[in-house]
Image (cartoon, helix red, strand yellow):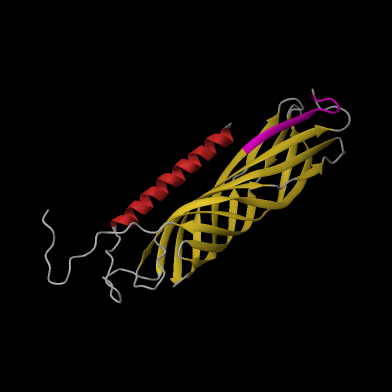
Amino acid sequence: MRGKIVIARLLIAGVATTAFACAAAAADLPVPAAAGAYYPGMVPSPYYDWTGFYIGGHAGALFTTDSRIAQIDVPTNTTTNVASFSSRGFAGGGYVGANMMFLRSFVLGVEANYDALTNKNSTLSADGSNRLDIRPFSFATVRGRFGLTADRFMAYIAGGWAWGEEKFTRTQLTGAANAASTGTVESVTNDREGWTFGGGFEYAVATNWVARLEYLYARLHPTSFTFPVSQARISAPFEPVSEVMVGMAFKFNPVAAAAPPAAGGTLPAK
């Protein structure tokens, strides 16, 4: 339930921020110029204009690096297992954002994305009595972007807020742990927040289609929780995350402004 609330907040924040950015961009759009001419601050044709909304899909791989996850028996306050954990899997999802181009070669933007994951891994306790399965299954970010362009090509950096959701499952394989007898399975879904930073490259393959290659690094905050039956407390430190994705987005054209008055003409009356 908490994950759904976080996702809803993410989408609301992304849409609101995107709308604000595009409203600012639309307010500053120059009026169209005659062929071969341009107004101050306007991107001259045929130079590619990156300003506008976009929405796209992407796919790739996500990696979580080694973390020392501790399992502690709550009644005795003793550590029963400390294990390293890493995972890799397929990541796929979508993204939405907005860009505003200025001074011909620079772009400011904001973007939100959500990805589903196939990552999973497991570890046995030191005595082999129980197994801990860990499955990160969601990853999302809201980021600001800054890009440097050369016509249809753009290199950019991005950074902001990151969120991940993972499921921990504990299975009692032999013996008993407090009220957990052999065969007891307990699961807890946990959210983590943190920060992300990365960058990538984009290329406008057509007027409204932009391809990209992107890398993101994230650090998700530590978490801890207790399985209610076995009374085993799980303590997990910072979780480093690396994501490599390729994507394709549809870019909406900027809203056209009213045409300028003809040479020698007068402005329309208000």
Q: Residue furthest bottom?
A: 36
Is 72 placed above or below 145 here? above
Who's the residue at 31% across and 68% down the image?
A: 42
23, 186: nearer the viewer: 23
Farthest top residue? 179
Residue 105: where, in percent of width, then height?
Answer: 40, 71
Q: Which image quarter is the N terminus in?
A: top right
> Which is nearer the eye, 190 or 3?
3
| x then y, percent, for residue 221 | 59, 45
- Relative placement, left or right, of 237 versus 163 is right
Residue 174 highlighted magenta (yes or no): no
The quarter holding residue 79 reads: top right
Q: Residue at x 63, y 56 (%)?
A: 242
Q: Is residue 257 left or right of residue 215?
A: left
Q: Quadrant of residue 71?
A: top right
Q: Is residue 178 left or right of residue 31?
A: right
* Range drawn in magenta: 180-190
Quarter-of-image position of residue 12: top left
Q: Position of residue 224 (x, y in %)?
A: 65, 37
In the rendered image, residue 233, in percent from the top left (x then y), is placed at: 71, 33
Q: State the residue in front, 20 or 32.
A: 32
- Residue 161 seen in the figure: no
Q: Residue at x 63, y 37 (%)?
A: 190
Asked whether 239 or 140 is in front, the reply is 140
Q: Is residue 166 visible?
A: yes
Q: Is residue 102 above or below residue 76?
A: below
- Total marks shown come to 0
